[in-house]
Amino acid sequence: MPSLMVESTTKMLDKWAALINSGSQEIDVEREITATAGEIIAKTSFGISYENGSKVLEKLRAMQITLFKSNRYVGVPFSKLMFPGKTMEAKKLGKEIDALLLTIVTARKNSNEGCGQKDLLGLLIQENGVDGRLGKKLTTRELVDECKTFFFGGHETTALALSWTLLLLAMHPEWQNQLREEIREVTGDKEIDFTKLAGLKKMGWVMNEVLRLYSPAPNVQRQAREDIQVNDLIIPKGTNMWIDVVAMNHDPKLWGEDVNEFKPERFKDDLYGGCNHKMGFLPFGFGGRMCIGRNLTMMEYKIVLTLVLTRFSFSISPSYTHSPAIVLSLRPSNGLPLIVTPLTISNGQDGPRTEKKSPPPSTD
Ligand code: HEM
């Protein structure tokens, strides 16, 4: 799995080098990284090509936008009737996505490797041990639904975490250099050794700080299964609750007056980053429904960032406009163009290691 991540990322970085050689230094890193993360989830979890994966992802993205426009009134009676056009469009897209995924699932079931292939789809198709219960088998409908969740949840959030990271590193070149230094110490100027990823401690702090400032999953939902009393407030059974993660992560009462500053060191020796409430930092949710992909994300984040930072430095493009928006996930609504500069090794060629300083940031 990690080698597939390296393969897809290297392909993206080679493309960046070619673009820069042909004279364009500005790259929309969000678009690029989202495509690469899509390729990674398609290959690692479903064993399919990027071409097939991207058909599913394009439709899921269209559905995301459609649903976001029409479903802001979730739980409001008859809300679907308020947006009949969008509701129809979402239904049509839903059917197309189901059909595409059904083709992928059926092809795997009929293939020679069949269910024995050790990726997520192979495990989901296997007859035994699903959900920890021997003999429990997912129906085709359930399989397709699981695939949708993993396809979408498995690439967009990670891609956004990486994209926001590059923005913050472009604004803080001292952190780009600190991370390069750490990478050099941990990998010893060699290829990434996956067993050493845990040693990239500062990169872990940076990831947490990015998830705090620009949480890709901006809210977590729960439904009250019975009446709940919170101080003087009664929350009636059946109430849908949205926990506003972005608001919590920017609350000075929880984090202090420097709440809006990029300070990865707040996570040094503190899993909660100095937050004064243990439920105040929930980038992956909490309890029994906590994100199942968090370890995979951590691995992908560290592999991709290591490869990116050892080949390029970043500063903000004058065409960047800061406009984070919640479209189910927290996205840069006008893309994320950055000025990308290849790092040079002593012979002056584009190369994997640098001793030179990044260019000064342009934050205007
Ligand atoms: C930065 C990356 C990610 C973030 C911020 C994130 C965030 C979240 C959050 C907030 C939840 C809801 C948890 C709750 O309700 O308590 C969730 C659930 C989930 N995530 Fe992630 N996620 C990320 C990456 C991934 C990846 C890479 C995968 C799969 C490969 C994934 C698969 C899932 C699934 C399947 C669930 C539903 C779990 C359940 O309901 O039992 N996520 N994620």
Image: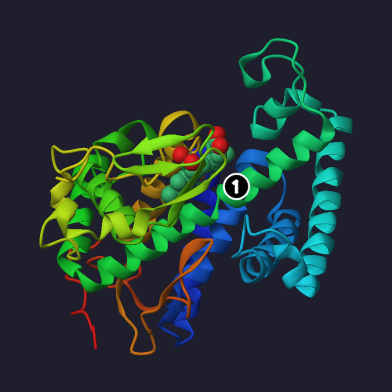
Vertical order, 45 against 305 (above or below): above
- Disc 1 CB within 8 Å of nearest ligand 1 atom: yes
Q: How is the image coloured?
A: rainbow
Q: Nearer the viewer, residue 33 or 227?
A: 227
Residue 311 in sight: no
Residue at (31%, 43%) from the top-left corner? 232
Residue at (35%, 69%) from the top-left corner? 350
Question: In this view, which residue lies farthest toward the left?
Answer: 257
The residue tagged with tag 1: helix, strand or loop?
helix
Q: Where residue 154 appears, x then y in whole percent? A: 56, 47
Q: Nearer the viewer, residue 30 or 246?
A: 246
Quadrant of the rendered image containing residue 69: bottom right
Q: Where residue 197 appears, x then y in whole percent? A: 32, 38
Q: Where residue 317 appears, x then y in whole percent? A: 34, 84
Q: Where residue 125 appears, x then y in whole percent? A: 76, 27
Task: For the C terminus, give its image quadrant.
Answer: bottom left
Left or right of 228 in this view: 269: left
Q: Residues within 10 Å of mark 1 (few under 14, many from 20)?
A: many
Residue 4 in sight: yes
Left or right of 267 in this view: 71: right
Question: What residue did someone put label 1 on?
Answer: 41
Residue at (45%, 86%) from the top-left corner? 24
Quadrant of the rendered image containing residue 215: bottom left
Task: For the N terminus, give its image quadrant.
Answer: top right
Left or right of 264 in this view: 166: right
Residue at (48%, 48%) from the top-left corner? 241
